[in-house]
Amino acid sequence: MRLIVGLGNPGEKYARNRHNIGFLAVDAIHGRNSSFAPWRTRFQAEVSEGLLDGEKVMLMKPQTYMNESGRSVGEAARFYKLAPADVIVLYDELDLPPGKVRTKVGGGSGGHNGIRSIDAHLGKEYSRVRLGIGHPGHKDRVTAHVLGDFAKVDAEWLDPMLDAIAAEAGLLVGGHHSEFCNRLHLALAPAKPQKPRKEQGAASGGTSRNPNPPLPRRGKDSAPKGALAEQLARMFGKKD
């Protein structure tokens, strides 16, 4: 069994905060995969069980508020006897540009209180999926940025990113982190504009074609033939 945890704060007040992008990602996985049951309350969290690529998975949104996320994760891990390697956590990352996704196993919390709490209850050797929300530019603006709502324009990168995460979540469960990131990169890369095709002729160094070529000049051998020609010759005389 695998445990996929999205981090955020409970309640409508925080629903569209940048800090809640982990909740949004887990909601996207739940919405895309019909095998998951309706959300229910357990382990001080909202949970749902289902299958991803044939593997049993529990989705989790801790309801303890961000700073105590580890209480829910630790309780579920102990109940199911899960190792840290069985846990995948999705959360917001200030140090990545908006729409960028990176994965790693272990490491420090990077100042993220939800990750710090999970480290304390579970250890550090679990998988982390860092979802870029961008940095506001100055440390004094970080709190307002993180707890601020996504802007309407953010939907241009946020919605495609959430869709791609939901579509490729089975790769995370299988431990294929590099392929997961590659698939997301391809899905989110802007389409390259096609170069206009060069016309034959001047553009390629050759001679351009005249759309209205001159009619060929008639010579002696190209005089008109037939009955009309003979009649004209008799009327006006034939010149040699």
Image: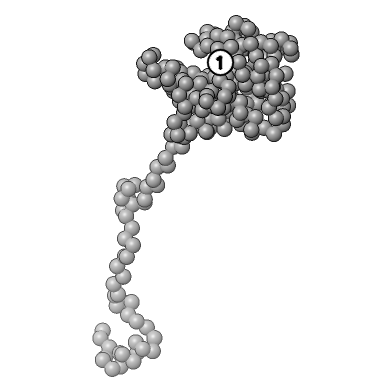
How packed is label 1: few (under 14 Cα within 10 Å), some, or many (20 or more)? many
On the rendered structure, is 114 left or right of 42? left
- Residue at the location (51% across, 21% down)? 19
- Classify 165 as above or below 114: below
Q: Position of residue 47 (x, y in %)?
A: 68, 22
Q: Position of residue 96 (x, y in %)?
A: 46, 20
Q: Position of residue 188 (x, y in %)?
A: 50, 31
- Classify 50 as above or below 3: below
Closer to the camera in the image, 120 or 52: 120
Closer to the camera in the image, 202 or 143: 143
- Examine the rendering and report whether any part of residue 90 can be seen: no
User: Among all residues in the image, which is located at the extreme bottom?
Assistant: 235
Q: Which residue is mark 1?
A: 66
Q: Position of residue 80 (x, y in %)?
A: 74, 13
Q: Tag 1's secondary structure?
A: helix
Closer to the camera in the image, 234 or 38: 38
- Residue at the location (52% across, 25% down)? 13
- Classify 48 as above or below 85: below
- Residue at the location (45% across, 24% down)? 148
Q: Amino acid at mark 1?
A: Met
Where, quadrant-wise, is the C terminus in this rendering?
bottom left
- Residue at the location (31% across, 70% down)? 215
Where, quadrant-wise, is the N terminus in this rendering?
top right
On the rendered structure, is 233 left or right of 78? left
